[in-house]
Amino acid sequence: MKAYLILENGVVMEGKSFGAQGETTGEVVFATGMTGYLETLTDQSYHGQIVLQTFPLIGNYGVIPSDFEGAVGVKAYIVKHPCREPSNFRSESNLHTFLSERGIIGLCGIDTRALTKIIRQNGVMNGKITMSPPTETDLSEAKAYAIRNAVAAVSIRAVTKTGNGPRRVALLDLGAKRGIADALSARGCEVWSFPHDAEARDILRIKPAGVMLSNGPGDPADPANRAAVETIRVLQQSGVTIFGICLGHQLLALANGHSTEKLKFGHRGANQPVKEISTGRVYITSQNHGYAVVADGSSFVNVNDGTCEGMDYGSAFSVQFHPEARGGPLDTAFLFDRFIERMDAHAAG
């Protein structure tokens, strides 16, 4: 069946639908990963967004539930060629069935390179997918769309506990990828996950050795995040060791008086070069974000555009990229070890 994408600048692209049928509106962003499409689809940081994969063939190793990061985060999915007959001994389904069962609209067959160029040249913009030729009403809906209260939509609702070990870590769930808790558990941590609106006193009540601030969706400066920023400020003042990733990095920066800005088209992929200032070493990282911290004294910077990729406040530190790197490089997994070392050093006095 024919399907269409209309961007808020009026550009219309015709393709074919796969997955679920219907219509949806969202912010259109592109991801450059050649693999890791399952992790992309189940990353809550994509909440409210229509994700375009720049790599042309997606779905060739099927659907593998053990690779999921959580529930589906994307509003819709755009690829050039979705593989209908995957080949992988771990595969349990195909991309079309996966999207259909979850009510996620797919669009294929369009010129994905041309669409990527439009976003790179003009910046991220909203769009609407429809099953019939778009109208002025569809264009108006695309222009009016905005992502609001994103963290509240994806955070857990109650405290949960996973893993066992000598160190207790409180994970503030802002839309956390499963890989973060897995990385902590693998290093001997008992992980207590808290909802985004948990108060600092409730988190400190369990006497954590450290606090993990997770990834998540939306604008970090959204007024809806002010309570979480205040919670982080109080946690930092308590002296507990803190490690933030992605949105957690941005909210920690806001709690320290810095600001954030929206990037033209963001960093979404598995090949972003990042330089650690203290050592001069460059790491290849997995990233997914549309906003960046504006601050002096970065501990890491993006080699391509010079944006802030990390901050170190002493007892608290954070990075913009994903060291757990599901579907990406593991160059910076040592940052979890650094978190463990700082927790142990603080406990030793």
Image (cartoon, helix red, strand yellow):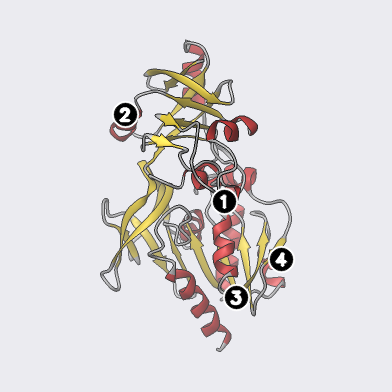
Which of the 4 quarters of the picture holds residue 58? top left
Query: Upstream in the sequence, badge 3 or badge 2?
Result: 2
Q: Which residue corresponds to mark 4?
A: 202
Q: x%, y% of residue 326? A: 48, 55
Q: Secondary structure at mark 3?
A: loop
Q: Nearer the viewer, residue 332 or 28?
A: 332
Q: Residue at x 33, y 52 (%)?
A: 271
What's the residue type where badge 2 is placed?
Answer: Ile
Q: Which residue corresponds to mark 1?
A: 69
Is 119 situated above or below 242? Answer: above
Q: x%, y% of residue 264? A: 34, 39
Query: Upstream in the sequence, badge 4 or badge 2?
Result: 2
Q: Nearer the viewer, residue 201 or 303?
A: 303
- The CA distance from mark 4 to mark 2 is 46 Å
What's the residue type where badge 1 is placed?
Answer: Glu
- The CA distance from mark 3 to mark 4 is 23 Å
Q: Nearer the viewer, mark 3 or mark 4?
A: 3
- The CA distance from mark 2 to mark 1 is 29 Å
